[in-house]
Each structure stands twice: as C-alpha cells, then as structure tokens.
Image (spheres, rainbow, N blue to C red):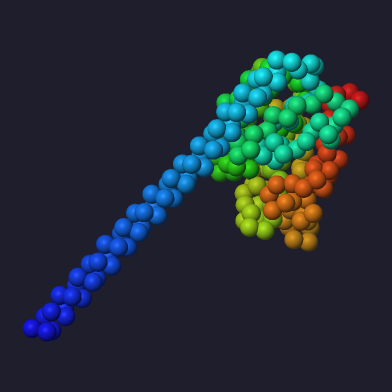
C-alpha cells in the first residue's frame, strides 16, 4: 500500500512539474511576444513621427544640395554641422529598412528635389535588402532624373555585431553592381571603416559595434566630401 501511495505521489509531483513548466513557458512566451510588439510599436511610432517631421520641414526648404537617406546611422549623423558649405537635409530614421525607405520616398526625396542623394540603408534587413534596393534607385531616377545618387556600401560592424560582416560583404558586391547598372556613384565605405588587424569596424569609429562616434562620422565625412563636391561641380 505504501509503495502504491509513493508511486501515486511521484506521479502527481511529475504532473505538477510538467504543468508548472508549461505555465512558465506560456507566460514567458506571451511576455516575449508582448515585448516584441511593444518594441515594434515604439519604432513604428517613431517612423510616423519622423515622416510627419519631414513633411513639415519640406514646406520651408529652399534649394537642397544634398539629402542623406538612411536608417539610424544617418539619423544620428549631424549633417548640417559636417557640411556647412551646403544646404543639406537629414532623411534618416532609426531602425528603418529598405522597405520603410521605399514607402517614404516622396517626403524623403521627391519633395526635396536635391541635387545629390547619399543613400546608406540595409543594415536592419540584410537578408531582404536586395529584394527592393534596385527598385528604390530606379524610382528615384524616374522621379528625379537630374539628381545624382551616391550609394554607400553597408558598413562593417564589430564585437557582438561582427557576425553579420560576411553578409554585408556579399550584399556590397551586389550594391556595386546596382550602382554600375544605374549610373550611380558607389562608395566602398566598408573598406574605409575597417580595421585590417581585426577585420571589424575600427573601435574608435563606433559606440557599441554598430553606430558611429564623432570620429566615425568624421571619417565618413572625409570620404564623402570630395565625392559630393565633384558631383555638385565644385
């Protein structure tokens, strides 16, 4: 009898543990989904706010020399400080992708009608960026036939982000081909920012392995400045 009771108690305990595990797993699964949803909503709200900001700014813009299109790498680039000789606008949105950029080309490019566009986009959707990257370029050329386009390569990363560098290298090969097919200027910013000793983004150029420090932006500006000047005829 005692033996049977012991077996029954063990079975109850095991079932209890299984139920608890399922319950905990469900809780954390729901929690994780809620976190992802909340994060998505934050980025979406930011995207909507930035688009509204661009549309408002466009109402009072004069003749624009250069428009910088991109994600957080552009959003955090104080272009007015780095290019005081030109009338420049920043059309970067943090966490954006090539898909998001394609949806906002009117307020980011067409309505601005810049002489030159500098485009750095794709780091947030490396796996899918090539699906619509060339279409973005072609849309810009169709709507702004006089605008010259600079395509920046995807930039290298370091530390915890460095595992994405091989994909960036592969995508950059295709970006160069897209630039050549469409008469754009391609800039290999990947090589410019790479530390040859580590094959990663130079530490002095980055905050956390992805986004740029002032030194990083200084380097980028140094590379872009003569190219922009040449395209503008200076």
Is residue 132 visible in the rendered structure shown here? no
Q: Quadrant of the C terminus?
A: top right
Give x and y (percent) for residue 52: 61, 23
Give x and y (percent) for residue 199: 73, 57
- Marks counted in the figure total 0
Give x and y (percent) for residue 178: 67, 33
Q: Residue at x 79, y 16 (%)?
A: 62
Q: Residue at x 65, y 47 (%)?
A: 168
Is residue 77 visible in the rendered structure shown here? yes
Q: Residue at x 70, y 47 (%)?
A: 211
Q: Residue furthest left?
A: 1
Judge whether 90 appears above or below 191 on screen: above
Q: Residue furthest bottom?
A: 2
The one of 25 and 165 positioned closer to us in this rendering: 25
Q: Is residue 66 left or right of residue 141?
A: right
Judge whether 150 appears above or below 169 on screen: above
Q: Quadrant of the N terminus?
A: bottom left
Q: Quadrant of residue 8?
A: bottom left
């Amino acid at each position: 009898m005692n033996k049977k009771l012991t077996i029954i108690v063990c079975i109850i305990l095991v079932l209890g543990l299984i139920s608890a595990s399922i319950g905990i797993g469900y809780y954390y699964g729901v929690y994780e989904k809620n976190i992802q949803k909340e994060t998505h909503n934050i980025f979406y709200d930011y995207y909507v706010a930035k688009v509204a900001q661009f549309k408002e700014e466009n109402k009072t813009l004069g003749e624009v020399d250069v428009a910088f299109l991109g994600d957080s790498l552009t959003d955090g680039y104080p272009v007015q400080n780095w290019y005081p000789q030109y009338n420049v606008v920043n059309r970067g949105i943090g966490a954006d992708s090539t898909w998001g950029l394609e949806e906002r080309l009117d307020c980011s490019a067409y309505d601005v009608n810049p002489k030159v566009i500098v485009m750095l986009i794709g780091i947030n959707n490396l796996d899918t960026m090539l699906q619509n990257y060339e279409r973005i370029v072609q849309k810009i050329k169709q709507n702004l036939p006089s605008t010259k386009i600079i395509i920046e390569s995807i930039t290298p990363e370091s530390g915890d982000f460095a595992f994405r560098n091989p994909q960036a290298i592969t995508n950059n090969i295709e970006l160069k081909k897209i630039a050549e097919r469409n008469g754009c200027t391609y800039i290999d910013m990947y090589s410019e920012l790479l530390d040859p000793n580590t094959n990663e983004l130079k530490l002095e150029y980055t905050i956390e392995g992805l986004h740029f420090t002032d030194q990083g932006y200084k380097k980028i500006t140094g590379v872009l400045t003569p190219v922009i000047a040449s395209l503008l005829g200076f």
